[in-house]
Each structure stands twice: as C-alpha cells, then as structure tokens.
Image (cartoon, rainbow, N blue to C red):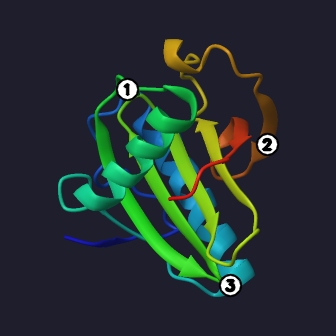
Amino acid sequence: MPYVVDFVNVSTEGLESSPVAEALAGLRANEARYYRNKYEHVFTTVPADEGAETLARITGVLAEERDIHIASPALEVTEFVVDGIRMSYVFYESGLSINVMYTLAEGGKRAVGFKLSEGMPVPEELSAFKFARQKSKLAGTIRGSFFVIKGEY
C-alpha cells in the first residue's frame, strides 16, 4: 500500500523494524521535502515487496557497477521521473538509503547515492567509500557518498 511521506509530521510508518527508525524516518522525510520544494513532487513509497522491480533495478546497478551487495533487508522503495531524471530509492532496515539518479536523455548525469541515518554504522559493504556529513532539521546528521554510473540501464 503506498505511503505519502509527510515531512511536517514525520512518521516511522513502514520503518518500525529499523533500530534507527526515527532517524530513518527523518531521512525519508528530508528527501520528501527536497522533491516537494524543488519539483512539486509528492514523495510516495511502497513496501519493498510491492516494488520488487525497483528494488531489482537498484540491486542490479550496485552489483554490476561495483559488486556491492547490501546485507540489510529492504523496507521501502519508490521510483518516479522528475525533470527527465528517473529517481529510484530504497530504504533499508539498517538505516541506509540508496538512490539511483538516471537521466533519461543520452549523455546525462547518472549516479548512485548512499545516505546513512544518524546513529547507524557504515555497512561493511560500503567501507571503501568516504562519507561527507550534512545537517538536517528532519534527520539530524546525515552521512552521504556517491559514485558515477558508467553503464547503461
């Protein structure tokens, strides 16, 4: 069942099994606020089992580009197109959020972004990445990193 993410009244709905559920909910709300303000897009997630195609796409990009396999179970996913860019997100039980930004036009920007919720350690599978810190009123301190996608998906 789709969940419209509210960035005013932050809820842990769908994320309750995470040990950092409140921080992950804040991270999800932070993303929702960004897309609402920049693109007037309503950020809506579905449980990972309902968004299997999106989860498979993200998992495939990670595996093919960098041989990364996330150990944590996926909780929620979303996928949408704004301004010619397909955005795919997955929120994991560990507190990790991964997004794949894929410009649909030939030669556009394409990247995978990682964001760690406040209070979660860096997962072993992402230990090779350097993480920058960002402050958020909704999510506390978010740590993030990314890599550029080289293949076609």
Give the percent coordinates (x, y) of residue 75: 30, 45
> Which secondary structure, mark 3?
loop
Q: Which callout, 2 or 3, points to the residue nearer the camera?
A: 3
> Which secondary structure, mark 2?
strand
Given residues 133 and 8, the one toward you in this image is: 133
Q: Which residue is mark 3?
A: 83
Q: Which callout, 1 or 3, points to the residue nearer the camera?
A: 3
User: The disc labelled 2 sits on which kind of residue?
Assistant: Lys
Q: Earlier in the sequence, mark 2 or mark 1?
A: 1
Q: Residues within 10 Å of mark 1 (few under 14, many from 20)?
A: some
Give the percent coordinates (x, y) of residue 130: 77, 22
User: The disc labelled 1 sits on which kind of residue?
Assistant: Pro
Q: Residues within 10 Å of mark 3 (few under 14, many from 20)?
A: few
Distance between the alpha carbons at the discs numbered 1 and 3: 35 Å
In the image: residue 1, left or right of residue 113 = left
Given residues 40 and 64, the one toward you in this image is: 64
Q: Which residue is mark 1?
A: 19
Give the percent coordinates (x, y) of residue 148: 72, 45
In the image: residue 23, left or right of residue 21 = right
Give the percent coordinates (x, y) of residue 117: 57, 35
Q: Earlier in the sequence, mark 2 or mark 3?
A: 3
Q: Which residue is mark 2?
A: 135
User: The disc labelled 3 sits on which kind of residue?
Assistant: Asp
